[in-house]
Amino acid sequence: MAEPNWNTTTTLWGMACIGSRIGTEHEKLGFNLSDNSRMSYDQIAQVLRKLQSRYGWNPIMEGEFIIGVQLDGQSVTLEPGGQFELSGAPVETIHQTCAEVNSHLYQVKTICEELGTGFLGLGFDPKWRIDDIPVMPKGRYALMKKYMPTVGTMGLDMMFRTCTVQVNLDFGSEKDMIEKFRVGLALQPIANALFASSPFKEGKPTGLLSGRGWVWTDVDKARSGGLPFVFEDNMSFERYVDYAENVPMYFVYRDGKYINALGQSWKAFMKGQLPALPGEYPTMDDWANHLTTIFPEVRLKKFLEMRGADGGPWRMICALSALWVGLIYEDQAQRESLALVSDWTAEEREYLRVEVPKYGMRTPFRGSTIQSIAKQVVAIAKGGLERRGHDEVGFLKQLEIIADTGLNQADHLLELYNTKWQRSVDPVYREMMY
């Protein structure tokens, strides 16, 4: 293959997206109603096959295994432990993205009722050890499982026990991307406080409110975190490319197989010197695959992924999209959001990223708590949604309650655990089942 001639700003990224599309993704934990154990691959494959035969989804195969389905710009795929992920099509309003989520949940709920299974909306598996959880038959996950323990203490927790909800949003120019990126990174801990729903691990409270958020503090520092360089004056598309090129590789995908390139250099690949494939140069598909192995709190592709929230019930899935659309899809709201975080230091942003998973809305910050910031953030988002003019403000109702009371989903689950549930996590499977 000839050496590629790539311009980092135009070829690697393409033209900045013009528009205001909304793409919502959420993950959920599949379990057996009989004993709350995690669903096996064979059970999950049954769900995928029924989505195909009953609702017209098209299968995604890896060798002989069905690993997902897709339809009309949407896809359903599997995370390493069988977490079931809907990646929605890009749409124009929160009403549309929420309708898409509701349709998907109706379909899988109908199928699961026949199979004696269900799906759980939490940020972290409340009961099972990693060894109890099946591994999905995707080649990249076998490589990641081997690599993760060499670069952090909680990578396997991330792979097998966490669930998130995220929203993907467009930007209109490089300047707009930088502003949205900065707002997103600074305010991810606020989203974590509002959406925290993972206080349990292996049947007991952990002392954390977002076990998922805490896991991300030590997965792999080379490919995760708060990206302080985004706040520096020389931030650009090219600066992010430089960062991504320095993230160690996982694999190269060729002829339906994942080739082990763990820890190898993308820059060596660009020179045709990758030990895993000597003499070969990367394609654009290789670059796209490499970007999917980078896990910061906000991830840049041809859009921005807001990745800081725990999974949760359907109303919170729609609320996450409403929050970020309100904050950065309306000019005045984006200016207000940027002004709110403009004087936060790198040390303060990192402090919030680490401390909020422990204390949630009660996290101390600048003489008060994060609750006061959360109230401002929700108010800014509400104003942005009102000015957008699509009658979307109602999707923020649950977040307004959380910000006003200072109590998130994790706080309520802990209260139930200590009272009505008599210190058992088993009732959470019915409480938080879709």
Image (tube, rainbow, N blue to C red):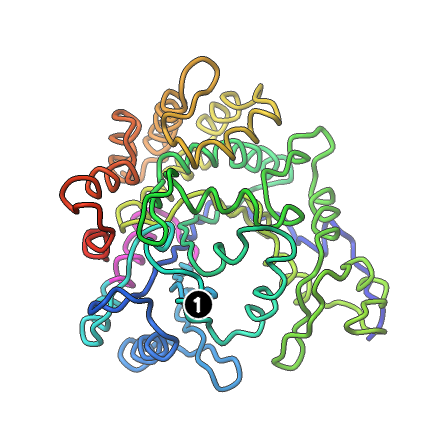
Q: Is residue 354 above or below residue 245?
A: above
- If the image is split into quadrants, where does the N terminus sit? bottom right
Task: Please tell me whether mark 1 sits on a helix, a strand or a loop.
Answer: strand
Residue 95 belongs to the span the image colors magenta:
yes
* Residue for point 63% across, 38% down: 227
Please name whichever residue, 213 or 106, is drawn nearer the observer in this view of the structure.
213
Q: Which residue is mark 1?
A: 78
Report the magenta stretch's main SS: helix
Q: x, y (%) of residue 89?
A: 42, 59
Q: x, y (%) of residue 151?
A: 64, 53
Q: x, y (%) of residue 113?
A: 18, 71
Q: Which residues are magenta?
A: 89-105
Please name whichever residue, 332 or 192, is drawn nearer the observer in this view of the structure.
192
- Furthest toward the top, the residue is 367
Q: Is residue 64 above or below residue 237?
A: below
Q: Is residue 317 above or below residue 400?
A: below
User: How many C-alpha atoms fall within 10 Å of the one at disc 1: few (<14), some, or many (≥20)?
Assistant: many
* Residue for point 72% across, 49% down: 241
Residue 98 belongs to the span the image colors magenta:
yes
Q: Classify residue 228 by image quadrant.
A: top right
- Furthest toward the left, the residue is 420
- If the image is split into quadrants, where does the C terminus sit? bottom left
Judge from the rendering whether residue 371 lies leftward or rightward of residue 63; answer left or right. left
Judge from the rendering whether residue 112 lies leftward or rightward of residue 227; answer left or right. left
Q: Amino acid at mark 1?
A: Leu
Judge from the rendering whether residue 111 lies leftward or rightward of residue 300; answer left or right. left
* Residue for point 29% across, 63% down: 104
Q: x, y (%) of residue 43?
A: 32, 77
Q: Classify residue 288 by image quadrant.
A: bottom right
